[in-house]
């Protein structure tokens, strides 16, 4: 990422809203803005294949019982408004195919995918695709629920409205009972 361009963009925003970028409280804002975006969008130019390679930490397993992680907290930036998608939780389930992934890696994959300009629908699909590559199974489901400040803080201004998406593959796509079992797993 180009920190200088991000600083210039912040300065232009400050000037564009009629503020003085040389005012004491705003003097360091462009640098802070650049640092924040570089942290929060650190995977913007990292491919899904690179993410899969980085977090591919699996262990042999002869069990085929469903594995479920619920309540992975994430946030991302809406690519349409560069507005925050927040209060976002990611739930993941899969059926092992001879191996399981270290559970912290699932949360790391979710974090990586959300550290890009995104839409919620793509986040779920990308997490599912990465896990499918790593685990060697299509039997993966990713459900996301989140609020979008592009809807809650601007435009229609409806705080509390949640968007829920589901990306299903393999047996989760064709087997309604398996999906139901996933949804019924308590996240507490």
Image: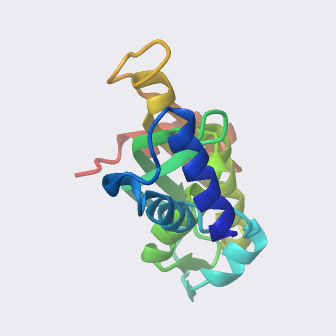
Display colour scheme: rainbow
How many marks the image carries: the answer is 0
Q: Nearer the viewer, residue 7 or 138?
A: 7
Q: Position of residue 188 (x, y in %)?
A: 22, 52
Q: Nearer the viewer, residue 45 or 13?
A: 13
Q: Position of residue 187 (x, y in %)?
A: 29, 50
Please name the residue shown 44% across and 38% down the image. Answer: 19
User: In this image, 184 relative to 11: left or right?
Assistant: left
Q: Position of residue 56 (x, y in %)?
A: 63, 82
Please name the residue shown 72% across and 58% down the image. Answer: 129
Can you say which quadrant of the picture contains the N terminus? bottom right
Residue 27 occupies quadrant: bottom left
Q: Position of residue 85 (x, y in %)?
A: 48, 40
User: In this image, 29 relative to 98: left or right?
Assistant: left
Query: Is residue 107 depicted above or below 105 in this figure?
Result: above
Please name the residue shown 60% across and 45% down the image. Answer: 12
User: In this image, 51 relative to 19: left or right?
Assistant: right
Q: Nearer the viewer, residue 76 or 38?
A: 38
Please name the residue shown 28% across and 47% down the image. Answer: 186
Q: Is residue 141 in sight in this rendering?
A: no
Q: Nearer the viewer, residue 166 or 110?
A: 110
Q: Is residue 130 in sight in this rendering?
A: yes
Q: Residue furthest top?
A: 156
């Amino acid at each position: 990422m180009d920190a200088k361009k991000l600083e210039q963009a912040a300065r232009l925003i400050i000037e564009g809203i009629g503020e003085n970028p040389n005012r004491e409280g705003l003097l360091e804002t462009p640098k802070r803005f650049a640092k924040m975006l570089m942290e929060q969008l650190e995977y913007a130019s990292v491919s899904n294949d690179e993410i899969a390679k980085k977090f591919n930490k699996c262990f042999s397993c002869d069990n085929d019982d469903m594995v479920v992680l619920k309540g992975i907290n994430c946030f991302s930036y809406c690519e349409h408004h560069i507005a925050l998608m927040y209060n976002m939780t990611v739930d993941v389930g899969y059926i092992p195919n001879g191996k399981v992934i270290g559970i912290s890696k699932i949360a790391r994959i979710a974090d990586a995918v959300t550290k890009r300009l995104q839409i919620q629908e793509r986040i779920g699909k990308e997490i599912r695709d990465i896990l499918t590559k790593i685990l060697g199974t299509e039997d993966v489901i990713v459900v996301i629920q989140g609020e979008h400040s592009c809807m809650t803080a601007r435009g229609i201004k409806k705080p509390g409205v949640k968007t829920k998406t589901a990306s299903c593959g393999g047996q989760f796509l064709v087997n309604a009972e398996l999906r139901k079992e996933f949804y019924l797993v308590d996240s507490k």
